Image (cartoon, grey):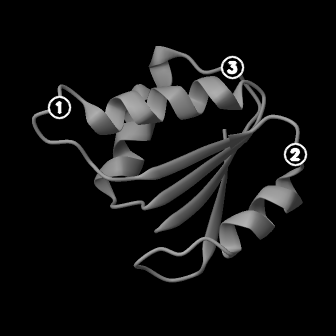
Amino acid sequence: MKKIVLLSNKKYSAESEDFLLSLINQGCELICFVGLDCESWEEAMDELAIGDGSNPKYITTTSHPAESLDEVINMAKHMKTGGSNNINVIEV
């Protein structure tokens, strides 16, 4: 899963930290957040990727509070990553 569009149906909470860390550890290169509280989801992902700064992970994140799922999927398709162009949509 190199490219992910995460559709949130709930507000971000610290309970989702392990889930986001698992995406980082899987080697995701792009995660686009759309839906409820997507900006907080993105901010949390950025903070987790940086960690304490001793071993930061490179990951591109975007949030799209005023866009539809289809618009975000289309945008993600056109962003270049080192992996495949397949988009995985995850709903939380």
Of the numbered discs 3 and 1, the one sitting upstream in the chain is 3
Identify the residue under disc 3: 11
- View extreme (bottom): residue: 84
Question: Where does the image place residue 70, in percent across and percent down from the top left?
Answer: 87, 61
Q: Check residue 67 in the rendering and tell me which mark sits there, or answer none.
A: 2
Of the numbered discs 2 and 1, the one sitting upstream in the chain is 1
Residue appearing at x 35%, y 49% in the figure: 24
Q: Residues within 10 Å of mark 2 (few under 14, many from 20)?
A: few
Reply above or below: 81 against 18: below
- Tell me the amino acid under the disc marked 3: Lys
Q: Residue 64 falls in which quadrant of the image?
A: top right
Q: What SS does tag 1 mark?
A: loop
Question: Where does the image place residue 2, in percent across and percent down from the top left?
Answer: 46, 68
Q: Check residue 53 in the rendering and tell me which mark sits there, or answer none.
A: 1
Residue appearing at x 87%, y 45% in the figure: 67
Q: Residues within 10 Å of mark 3 (few under 14, many from 20)?
A: some
Q: Tell me: 35 left or right of 87.
A: right
Q: What SS does tag 3 mark?
A: loop
- Mark 3 and 1 residues: CB-CB less than 8 Å, in contact? no
Q: What SS does tag 2 mark?
A: loop
